[in-house]
Amino acid sequence: MKFVRKSFPVGPLQCNCTVLGDTESGMGYVFDPGGHPQRIMATVAELGLNIIGIVHTHAHLDHFLAAGDIRRLTGAPIWLHRSDQFLWDSLEEQCTSFGVPYIPQPDPDHWLEHEQVLECGGLCIHTPGHTPGSASFYFKDDRLLLAGDTLFLGSVGRTDFPGGDSRALKNSIQRRLYSLDESAVVVTGHGPETSIGQEMRHNAFVRAN
């Protein structure tokens, strides 16, 4: 397996989208397509991947505004944790709240499960707190974690939006993320990358027990 990955900000709120996969098999995924579908597809072509899944860490508008376009262009199914369906269904309200143009999106095709293994080798880890259905994706062999808005460099995801739960967020980070390889690179939902070890020792909000 030859693993390739590119992460870059997209959309009105600069969500970090990730395109990754295996160039030997050609299979790949798009995580959190929050906008700029042309840029996402250019990256897919650059990496030489056939997208077989469009995967979401959660259902806030800035993480899935281009999901429908990517689905139309690739034919790949949309994946989401079922607990965030209420947020997916409230996209128009979310857009109105943030002053973002509303772009209708198709319903998710499949529901993610905790500890589900993706075809490209990633492990789905249910990490509720920022939203009830927030999920992170861990690629053990490549020491990579896609954390969405659960964990940031020196910070954590907000819990004051509908469905947010600060206690659940802390539990998700301490029990499920801080148990991973400390050297693993963390691609956050917004802003710069970090590492598990860095956050365990220096995160201002949640440190390891």
Image (tube, rainbow, N blue to C red):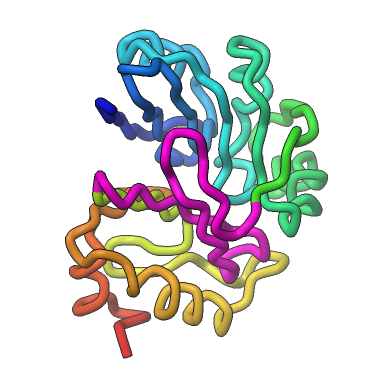
In which quarter of the view is residue 196 placed?
A: bottom left
Q: Is residue 121 above or below residue 8?
A: below
Residue 128 belongs to the span the image colors magenta: yes
Looking at the rendering, in which quadrant would you find the N terminus? top left
- Which region shows up in magenta? 113-142
Q: Is residue 77 above or below residue 155?
A: above
Residue found at the very far bottom of the displayed protein? 209
Query: Is residue 12 visible in the rendered structure shown here?
Result: no
Task: Give the number of callouts.
Answer: 0
Q: Residue at x 29, y 79 (%)?
A: 204
In which quarter of the view is residue 128 placed?
A: bottom right
Q: Residue at x 35, y 52 (%)?
A: 145
Query: Is residue 151 visible in the rendered structure shown here?
Result: yes
Looking at the rendering, in which quadrant would you find the C terminus? bottom left
In which quarter of the view is residue 84 placed?
A: bottom right
Q: Is residue 19 above or below residue 187?
A: above
Q: Where does the image place residue 127, in percent across and percent down from the top left?
A: 54, 66
Left or right? Give the position of 62 relative to 106. left
Q: Where does the image place residue 172, in percent across and percent down from the top left?
A: 49, 74
Q: Residue at x 43, y 79 (%)?
A: 175
Residue 139 belongs to the span the image colors magenta: yes
Prevailing secondary structure class for the magenta stretch in the rendered image: loop
Left or right? Give the position of 173 relative to 76. left
Q: Where does the image place residue 106, in percent across and percent down from the top left?
A: 78, 28
Q: Which one is nearer the viewer's eye here, 162 or 146?
A: 146
Q: Residue at x 40, y 34 (%)?
A: 18
Q: Where does the image place residue 6, in percent across and percent down from the top left?
A: 30, 29
Left or right? Give the position of 153 relative to 106. left
Q: Which one is nearer the viewer's eye here, 155 or 28?
A: 28
Q: Which one is nearer the viewer's eye here, 64 or 102?
A: 64
